[in-house]
Image: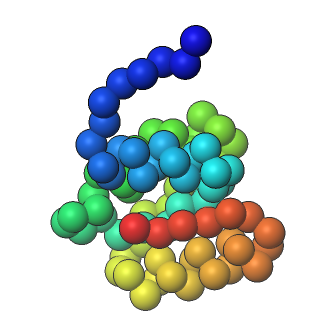
Amino acid sequence: MVEERFVQGNEACALGAIAANCRFFAGYPITPSTEIAEQMSILLPKYGGSFVQMEDEIASAGAIIGASWSGMKAMTA
């Protein structure tokens, strides 16, 4: 049986990314998406993924572009 639970939207975003096989996250923790980065930093190592905290939004975009060029599913928030 599938476990049912209620989660906030940002946690749901992170869980959905993991379920969609996202294995690379580069993010800059800033409101309103800080919880996504927090959840991805916890979840990704458990699934063989990589989490990188970047210095700003532009660096995050560059990192996920590079990861996607290598064939990984990547995201930022």
Give the answer, above or below, for where 12 lies relative to 28. Answer: above
Colour mapping used in the image: rainbow
Q: Quadrant of the N terminus?
A: top right
- Tell me residue 21's x, y (percent): 68, 50
Q: Residue at x 35, y 80 (%)?
A: 56
Q: Residue at x 79, y 73 (%)?
A: 70
* Residue 38, visible in the rendered structure: no
Compared across the picture, whether 74 is left or right of 68 comes to left
Q: Residue at x 51, y 82 (%)?
A: 61
Residue that lies at the very extreme toward the right in this rendered image: 71
Q: How many marks?
A: 0
Quarter of the image for residue 44 reads top right
Residue that lies at the very extreme toward the left in this rendered image: 31
Q: Quadrant of the C terminus?
A: bottom left
Compared across the picture, whether 12 is left or right of 46 comes to left
Q: Residue at x 47, y 77 (%)?
A: 60
Choose between 7 and 66: the one closer to the eye. Answer: 7
- Tell me residue 35's x, y (percent): 29, 51
Give the answer, above or below, for where 59 lies relative to 12. Answer: below
Choose between 2 and 60: the one closer to the eye. Answer: 2
Compared across the picture, whether 39 is left or right of 30 comes to right
- Tell me residue 49's x, y (percent): 64, 49
Compared across the picture, whether 76 is left or right of 18 comes to left
Choose between 12 and 33: the one closer to the eye. Answer: 12
- Tell me residue 22's x, y (percent): 63, 55
Give the answer, above or below, for where 71 lies relative to 50. Answer: below
Give the answer, above or below, for where 3 lies relative to 38. Answer: above
* Residue 28, visible in the rendered structure: yes
Residue that lies at the very extreme toward the top in this rendered image: 1
